[in-house]
Amino acid sequence: MNEQEIKALLEEQKQLISGFQQQNESLLKDRISKTDLDAYGANIRTRLDAIEAELLKFKEPQRGDENKDALAHKVIFEKALRKGFGALAPEEQKVMTVSDLTTGGYLAPADFTNELLKTVVEYSPMRQVARVVQTENRSKQWPKKTQSASAAWVSEIGSRTETTNPKFGLEEIPTHEMYALAKVSKQDIEDAKYDLLGFLREEFTEQFGVLEGTSFVSGDAVGKPEGFLTNASVGGFTGVTTSAKIVADDLFQVLYALKEAYARNATWVWKRSSTLAIAILKETTNQYIWQPGLQSGAPALVLGRPYIECPDMPAEASSAKAVAIGDWKRGYIIVDRVAIEVLEDPYASKSTGCIEISARKRVGGQVVLPEAIKIYTLKS
């Protein structure tokens, strides 16, 4: 088939399509019937298919012949217009798209944002309420009164004997060490568009907060701080009514187990889920017991005392120590020895082309005045 024959077929194809459009307009103007149009359309489609079959024989043009290449593309283009893109064969669908890297995707790079999306990491807010001190030694010591003096009544000239004298002890809080270590290839550090070293420093700091926060609540004092839940001298109240649930009456009991001097500065500590459990407590009249203040800027109080939500506290469960209250400034002390020290070691792993990023922190913490803290243990 030569070029003139191809042009003739294309012209005929064009006229057939134009004729069908005219007949369709005649139908809209009620000049012909739909039956006549259908019959006319069937004949046109038969002829168009025959023309297309002839033209498609020419769909693989010889390289260098620009006229043939243009005609072949025109044939495929008209086919797509009449029957839709899905009717084209795979070899006919030679389009440039960003979804295919080789046909244009490489030319449309993504817009890289130098910002890392991170999930929220929760950790104990005990540093907000406890007393925090610094030290330049391995531990911090306080003299502590272990026995009070006594007094007695006596007559005007009665004999006076020695009364009980005070006794003293020593409260010592040792500091413990936390560490984190990551190996990063030098090429990763050199080529990363994100501040990888800065990110690791932030990540280590955050995870130290998580680790120490857990210990302030439930640490066993073995190579780590002592938690107030694990101190055997901290008393409190155990529920006697509803099992595994926080009860309003029990909250009163544990609050009033504190001495008045401590209660005036006391703060509740519990898990966020316990805030919900307390918020939905109701009276027999179906009224909510807890009515948080709605005044702007005013803190929410429970039985007149503020609270903090601590993710390391146990949730409601049988025999769970779900609630604590205390004058934390007097009852619990946190000792910081070394804040956070970050070291970059390019030598330890040089044989593997890596740099070791390590961080350390020294901190201690323990209960120093057990009577200033009370624990509410749920009924089993």
Image (spheres, rainbow, N blue to C red):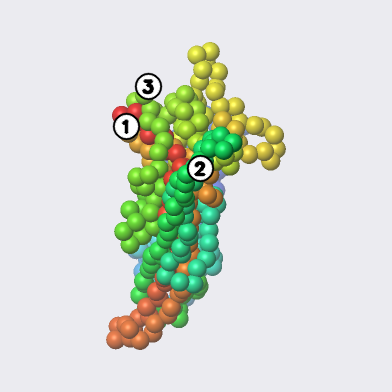
Question: In the rendered image, which quarter is residue 302 located in?
Answer: top right
* On screen, residue 267 above or below 115: above
State the mark number for residue 241.
Answer: 3
Q: Is residue 101 above or below residue 64?
A: above
Residue drawn at 33 percent across, 53 percent down: 220
Where residue 299 appears, as percent x and y from the top left, is 63, 39
Q: Residue at x 47, y 44 (%)?
A: 161
Q: Is residue 208 visible?
A: no
Q: Tell me residue 170's x, y (percent).
A: 43, 59
Tag 1 residue? 318
- 3D distance between C-alphas at marks 1 and 2: 55 Å
Residue 366 visible in this rendered orientation of the protein: yes
Instruction: Give the residue at x 60% y 33%.
Output: 304
Element carrying mark 1? loop
Ranked by sequence position, the earlier of labels 1 and 2 is 2
* Residue at the image position 52 percent from the left and 49 percent from the top: 330
Q: Identity of the amino acid at label 2?
A: Arg
Foreground: disc 1 or disc 3:
3
If the image is split into quadrants, where does the C terminus sit? top left
Around disc 2, counting alpha carbons within 10 Å, would you say few (fewer than 14), some (14 to 19), or many (20 or more)? few
On residue 348, the disc is none
Q: Callout 3: helix, strand or loop?
A: strand
The foreground one among 363 and 141 is 141
Q: Position of residue 217 (x, y in %)?
A: 41, 49
Q: Residue flagged by tag 3: what amino acid is it?
A: Thr
Farthest residue to the front: give it: 157
Q: Earlier in the sequence, mark 1 or mark 3?
A: 3
The local crowd at label 3, few if under 14, some if 14 to 19, many if 20 or more residues have their Cα within 10 Å, is some
Dot 2 corresponds to which residue? 160
Tell me the crowding category of disc 1: few under 14, some 14 to 19, or many 20 or more residues within 10 angstroms, Cα based.
some
Q: Nearer the viewer, residue 114 or 26?
A: 114
